[in-house]
Image: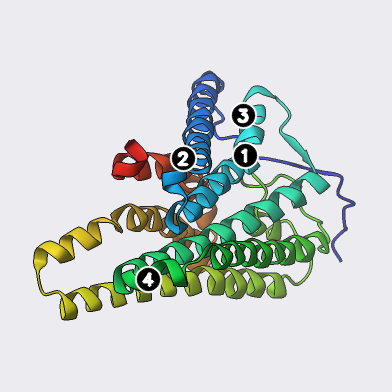
Amino acid sequence: MENVTTVNEFLLLSLTSVQELKPVFFLMFLIIYLINLVGNGAILMIVILEPKLHSPMYFFLGNLSCLDICYSSVTLPKVLMNLLSARRAISFLGCITQLHFFHFLGSTEATLLALMAFDRFVAICNPLRYTVIMNPQLCVLLAAVTWFISFFNGLTHSVMTARLDFCHSLKINHFFCDVKPLLELACGNTELNQWILSIVTGSVSMGAFFLILLSYFYIIGFLVLKNRSCRILHKALSTCASHFMVVCLFYGPVGFTYIRPASATSMSEDQTVAIIYSAVTPVLNPLIYTLRNKEMKT
């Protein structure tokens, strides 16, 4: 039998093993993180303070900006610390906590994007009843349920991972704590954990993605059947363009990492993709919404 190790801490992988590149990486990721904080923080503040933006669309956009600030804050501060430190350790509790919030906020974003697609569907297909259907009480309820359910989704992964015994090297083959690299270090049978990762994460992300596609399908079908003018169709779809771009930026990397089958050579690819959805995407979201939205630019 393999020796089971009592785990107090893990060692994280550095983004680069070249010492000369570490200051460059540190400066680059620090700038990315600051842009994320300033950009999303500005959107959140404007949505709260500007009465003209007190609508369902901007309520969900404010949630998304808050989410992006938290999402990148789960991983980037630790990445920056590790670039300056020779010993890249993270405590067992800190690792499980990071894992929990990473999946909690990730599933929240997936569901929130589906709510934003539903909001656009109601606005375009039922414009006269929009304010009645998407009333403030319903919007708050939908957002609260999204955050609540996603919290327990993240809790499922963190609890199941924390119960594992670790008997291999405690060096995590990743720059932050995630389920897949931790399962590589675990002793015994991890099929249940693999099943939960594939089924639960896949169901949440793909279920939300299906609702997004369904919303856009109905929007396009409604506009083609009711308004056969290409100009009206183009105008309506242009209001959804920002949301669609954010959906592609989010679901591309997530699908690559969690939906496809794991392989022995996939971890290095996962690290590259993880940089996109943990650092780059939260920065691009505010730029996409502000540059393509007249009300936000005003």
**Does the image show residue 265?**
no
Residue farthest to the bottom, as pictured? 225
Residue type, mark 4 in image: Val
Q: Which residue is mark 1?
A: 73
> Horizontally, is 95 left or right of 228 in the view?
right
Q: Give the crowd class for mark 3: few <14, some 14-19, many >=20 residues within 10 Å.
A: many
Q: Earlier in the sequence, mark 3 or mark 4?
A: 3
Question: Disc 4 and disc 1: Cα gap in Å?
Answer: 33 Å
Residue closest to the eye, 68 or 76: 68
Q: Nearer the viewer, mark 4 or mark 2?
A: 2
Q: Earlier in the sequence, mark 2 or mark 3?
A: 2
Provide residue 121's location: percent of width, then percent of height: 35, 70
Q: Which residue is mark 3?
A: 80
Q: Nearer the viewer, mark 4 or mark 1?
A: 4
Q: Residue at x 33, y 71 (%)?
A: 128
Residue type, mark 1 in image: Ser
Residue closest to the eye, 236 or 100: 236
Question: Disc 1 and disc 2: Cα gap in Å?
Answer: 26 Å
> Horizontally, is 143 left or right of 159 in the view?
left
Q: Which mark is residue 115?
A: none
Q: Nearer the viewer, mark 1 or mark 3?
A: 1
Question: Disc 4 and disc 2: Cα gap in Å?
Answer: 23 Å
Which secondary structure, mark 4?
A: helix
**Residue 33, above or below 65:** above
Provide residue 294's location: percent of width, then percent of height: 29, 42
Question: Disc 2 and disc 3: Cα gap in Å?
Answer: 34 Å
Q: Which mark is residue 50?
A: 2
Provide residue 189's location: percent of width, then percent of height: 75, 72
Residue closest to the eye, 205 or 198: 205
Q: Which residue is mark 4?
A: 122
Residue type, mark 2 in image: Glu
